[in-house]
Image (cartoon, rainbow, N blue to C red):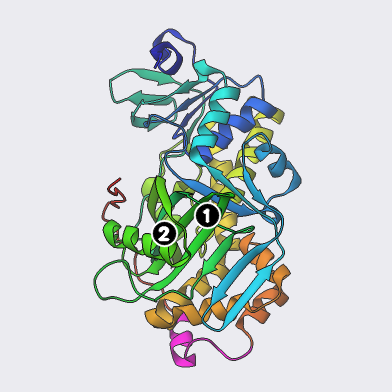
Amino acid sequence: MNDSLHHPAPDSMAPHDIVIVGGGLAGGLIALALHRHAPDCRFLLIEAGRTLGGHHRWSWFETDLAPQARALMAGFDLNGWDEGYDITFPGLGRTLPTSYRSLASAEFHARLMAELPREQVMLETKAAQLDADGVTLADGRRIDARRVIDCRPFRASRHLAGGWQVFLGQHFACEEPHGLTRPVIMDASVEQSAPYGNEAAYRFVYVLPLSPTEVFVEDTYYADQPKMDAEVLKGRVAAYARAKGWKGEVIDQEAGILPVVSGGNFRAALAEIAIPGVALAGARGGFSHPLTSYTLPFAADNALAIARLIATRPGVSGNELAAFCERRAKRHWRATGYYRMLSRMLFEAAKPDKRVVVFEHFYALRGRLVERFYAGRSTWPDRLRILSGKPPVPIPRAIRALFSSGKPLDTKPLNTETPA
């Protein structure tokens, strides 16, 4: 690695217009949007890891993105399926028509490093402290900036309530063609059990055919605790692949634990992590879907909004940018309240081993309704339709969940390390 490309000497430079701390999805897309739409902005992207984006795969429905957001993602080497996707439940199997997209973090890193100016990206660089005037690095160096954006990972708060989405996925190179032509977004016909101990959880398998002979298989759980037994999950992924007749080599693996936020005091949660004059973005700033944990549509939308602000108001201050992002975060929180209520229904009204019934009830509804749900744009008729009909949870438990403040999120650090 050529250190001159990844570790510029900020001490000798004038203050940057913007320093972005955290080169994950949100930070990387903000940098890309600034580069394309605010070319006079002198930004710096700082990432603690060796690559941008970490080790993840982000997926979304084509209908999740507005035209400008699709244009932002157009330069990436995406996996895409235009024949729809499948879902499978004990009493339901359907093919829905919506096109689906997926992006691996390796491709995310490659595209950004090819397009962004090398001197504006710092890898393997840990930020120790952020403030309104810049960033102090772990090695003591100081980077001055007119504006700072905090895109570091999500941090659980005692002010937020909910559960967790626990997952481990493996990328197989099969010896023979696997035969799939479209993704399986949810195969919930599998045994409903948690990835640890004897506790129950909603479990499904997620499958992406990446090429005629390569397939990504992920075991996913909606669980009450942020726990992972990686060996159990690896065994279950292998068993699923064997049952499908897919023989081959595992060439990659990823795992994670994501929050499924069902309620709480968002203002207090923001205040707990906010730094005066520093803008918050990404999952850390609350920009995710409360029930699905999808982040890419919101990250792309935010990146474009920030770039437009900087392009049209190049003199906007750091405090104004921080206030702009905070307003967007609070608006997003208000707009997604319905989905947090559904999360409470899932985690508090439905018994863990019966959560599959909640999702089966949902996926029996019309495809356009499902599209709008994932995009976070459910209409009022959609919302009434989701809650109508025979309730998938006991009514007394549903009423208690409706008025519950939710179970506080576990604030212990999450351990998502898994054996290779």
Asked if residue 69 lies left or right of residue 144, the reply is right
- The span shown in magenta is 389-402
Q: Position of residue 39 (x, y in %)?
A: 66, 22
Q: Is residue 17 above or below residue 28?
A: above
Residue 268 falls inside the magenta stretch: no
Q: Position of residue 130 (x, y in %)?
A: 38, 31
**Closer to us: 89 or 224:** 89
Mark 1 and 2 residues: CB-CB less than 8 Å, in contact?
A: yes
Query: What amino acid is at disc 2?
Result: Pro
| Residue pictured at 53% horizontal, 67% vertical | 186
Q: Is residue 19 above or below residue 98?
A: above
Q: Which SS class for mark 1? A: loop
Query: What amino acid is at disc 1?
Result: Ser
Residue 391 falls inside the magenta stretch: yes
Q: Which SS class for mark 2? A: strand
> What residue does disc 2 label?
259
Furthest-left residue in this view:
197
| Residue pictured at 67% horizontal, 81% vertical | 385
Q: Position of residue 79 (x, y in %)?
A: 61, 46
State the CA–CA distance, disc 1 to disc 2: 9 Å
> What residue does disc 1 label?
288
**Which quarter of the picture shows residue 185?**
bottom right
